[in-house]
Amino acid sequence: QDGPGVDIVHDLEEPLPKKWGKFQHVDLCSVLEHVRRPWVLAETVQALMARKATILVSVPFVWRIHSYPSDFWRMTPEALDVLFPGIGWTEKRFVVRNRLRKRVPGINWSGEKFLARAETVAFACSIS
């Protein structure tokens, strides 16, 4: 979305112009849940990454709906393997209460059991 501090507005479900070249790092923080077809975006992202590029992904796993303008998806760490088959992930975890965790803990609320609010996060330091 255009606004102050925004250099480029581009729909990542569409290929990037070749003149932009390849990128050394990609941040996908709080993006994938808002994309109608994240598998298409993931293919575009992999195509724009240089051979030894790094990538950081953060996407809700257990989270409230937050439409900006729409909110479609929640993802497990395994979903990132499916979306990004060309990425050799260095680390995949959950963030719960600002801490990296291997599992999402359960919480009790009014006698009911729920999972704590969590995000799936992953980092890779090169593509396969």
Image (cartoon, rainbow, N blue to C red):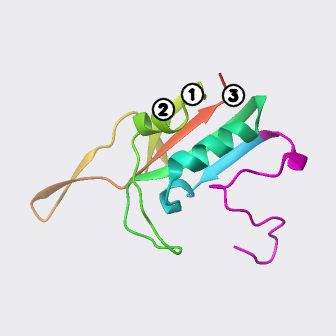
Residue under the point 51% across and 62% down: 34
Return the residue nearer the eye: 88 or 42. Answer: 42
Residue under the point 75% across and 32% down: 53
Identified by mark 1, the residue type is: Trp
Query: Gap between marks 1 and 2, in whole Å?
Result: 8 Å
Q: Residues within 10 Å of mark 2 (few under 14, many from 20)?
A: some
Residue stretch in magenta? 1-24
Q: Quadrant of residue 2?
A: bottom right
Q: Position of residue 52 (x, y in %)?
A: 77, 26
Residue furthest to the top in view is 128
Identified by mark 2, the residue type is: Asp
Return the residue nearer the eye: 109 or 21. Answer: 21
Say above or below: 50 vs 97.
Answer: above
3 or 1: tag closer to the N-terminus: 1
Query: Gap between marks 2 and 3, in whole Å?
Result: 15 Å
Find residue 113 and name its label.
Answer: none
2 or 3: tag closer to the N-terminus: 2
User: Could you tell whether 28 is left or right of 5 in the image?
Assistant: left
Q: Which residue is mark 3?
A: 125
Q: Position of residue 25 (x, y in %)?
A: 76, 40
Q: Residues within 10 Å of mark 1 (few under 14, many from 20)?
A: many
Identified by mark 3, the residue type is: Cys
Quadrant that contains the C terminus: top right
Residue under the point 82% across and 71% down: 5
Find residue 81 and name its label.
Answer: 2
Q: Which residue is mark 1?
A: 89
Are the residues tagged 1 and 2 within 8 Å (C-beta)? yes
User: Could you tell whether 1 is left or right of 23 in the image?
Assistant: left
User: Could you tell whether 49 is left or right of 81 in the image?
Assistant: right
Secondary structure found at label 3: loop
Say above or below: 61 vs 92.
Answer: below
Q: Main secondary structure of the magenta part?
A: loop
